[in-house]
Amino acid sequence: MQKIITLSLSPKRASDEKYYKPDAANFLKINVEDITGIQILKKSIDARKKFVKVNLQLQVWWGEVYTKQKTFNLELKDVCKKPEVIIVGSGPAGLFAAIKLIEKGFKPIIFERGKDVKERKKDIQLINTNKGVNPNSNYCFGEGGAGTFSDGKLYTRSKKKGDVRRVLDILEFHGAENNILSDTHPHIGTNKLPGIIVKIRETIQTAGGKIYFETPVIDFIIKDNSIKGIVTKNGDKFFGKAVILATGHSARDIFELLNKKGILLQEQSFSMGVRVEHPQEIIDSIQYSCKVRGDYLPAAAYNLVSQVENRGVYSFCMCPGGFIVPAATAPGEIVVNGMSPSKRNSNFANSGMVVQIKTEDFPNKDKYGVLAGLKFQQDIEKIAFQNGGGGVIAPAQRLSDFVNGKLSKSLPDTSYNPGIISSPVHFWLPEQIGNKLQEGFKVFNNKMRGFLTNEAVVLGVESRTSSPVRIPRDKKSLQHIQIKNLYPCGEGAGYAGGIISAAVDGERCASMVS
């Protein structure tokens, strides 16, 4: 027999099968020796009460031979001589689009402005030591896109738009831990993602797909409102049945190129703010109602949201046991982002804290038109640089000082490797962002007593939450509403927000190519 059951257990008893197997037997009123197989389907933490519980949804077999569940297998045929489809960008959207194209019998040709993972790591190290930003090889650009050196959060609400489980299966097939298939908030870790991305690339190449690194696309070949191909920086032209545009939300030059060529773009609301970092033990004590986190509990996370003067103020990309990194894509900018290793064992917890920016808030619309939001975003990043300490040394302020409008005389330790410098972040942030954050932090402290503290630090700025520009496409065909065979997809096109939703959207677009 077999049955799906749910158990609510202590963190220790949920940590290992040798503990929860007897609990499952007791629940089913059978002998533990009769259980022939047991598998975790879902796992989540419930910290709402004084004593933290872990909820396990288990499938249990007993009284019959247990046959291990069939694992996912990706079988791709050789597409070396098949019709070619161009993909611009090798982030999650681009890579998963390539896999889907191969399954459909097309040969994907990927053009990536940045370097492969191995070479990209060297440029990341230069940024982390404040030795310069390579505009084409950084935390946003390069093999795997922004997802490669990111936290690897795999949670998404976009489950109606595609096969999320398939994306998780493909990631596990290429080396991700099996627990991403069962955890409520699955996570890979920045230390493991690069290796997974390399294996996905090898899968694509083995099947006959091709990837050009350090090959920026500078123009599109369009005839009779139909895209025929692309032009690379060195002047080479490539043609294909379709072009999947998966460049990510930071490819400003692509937005400018599309706008220059008269290809329809749309303004889009987005969010900007700061990144806040606490000692992890403070977040643990608040969330778990304890002085010291137990051995069987993960670093605690949080999710905060409020409305301040009809604007959303919320936490974004919360990274327990993580660190803050410099995510600028050009010299003269300061952009910060957060990530966690797979064990989430840093002494710090960080999160983006951002304010909703509506299209009517964009300044200089008369001058910049549909790109006004993009220019606004860039201007704030330049202001952050001007208030930093040179290079990617970030402007910072203690959290309570930020809320109270006081310059911090000293700053706490931080995970941000390039370094921080005291700055009146509350003063130079645009009023519609800074003031709303100040009020939002007060609200969040009411929800999490002890959150508002000078042991926490604010770093500026968190500005790349999503794209301020959308590339409109037909709802059914997913092609651009003006240009035939052009498939805008992922975060840069305004149709995704994270690794999973971008991958799902890439597969959706690829499935429409014919």
Image (cartoon, rainbow, N blue to C red):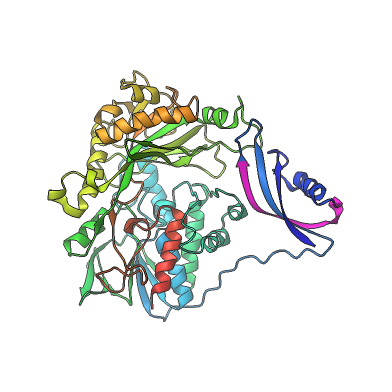
Left or right for 46, reference 1: left
Q: Residue furthest left?
A: 367
| x, y percent for residue 382 | 23, 39
Quadrant (top left, top right, bottom left, bottom right) of the C terminus: bottom left
Q: Considering depth in this image, is 159 or 225 the residue closer to the camera?
A: 159
Q: At 23% from the left edge and 33% from the top edge, which residue is drawn?
A: 386
Left or right for 445, reference 259: right
Which image quarter: residue 284?
A: top right
Q: Which residues are magenta?
A: 30-45
Question: Magenta stretch mostly in which secondary structure?
Answer: strand
Q: At 20% from the left edge and 76% from the top edge, which residue is drawn?
A: 223
Q: At 30% from the left edge and 39% from the top edge, which residue is drawn?
A: 334
Residue 462 visible? The answer is no
| x, y percent for residue 186 | 55, 50
Which image quarter: residue 60?
A: bottom right
| x, y percent for residue 436 | 32, 33
Q: Residue furthest top?
A: 409
Image height of 350 relative to 119, above or below: above
How many dots with numbers? Answer: 0
Magenta residue check for 203:
no
Q: Residue furthest front?
A: 310
Q: At 30% from the left edge and 47% from the top edge, which residue is drawn?
A: 329
Residue 32 visible? The answer is yes
Q: Considering depth in this image, is 238 or 27 the residue closer to the camera?
A: 27
Left or right for 396, reference 278: left
Image height of 168 relative to 191, above or below: below
| x, y percent for residue 91 | 40, 58
Magenta residue check for 41:
yes
Quadrant (top left, top right, bottom left, bottom right) of the N terminus: bottom right
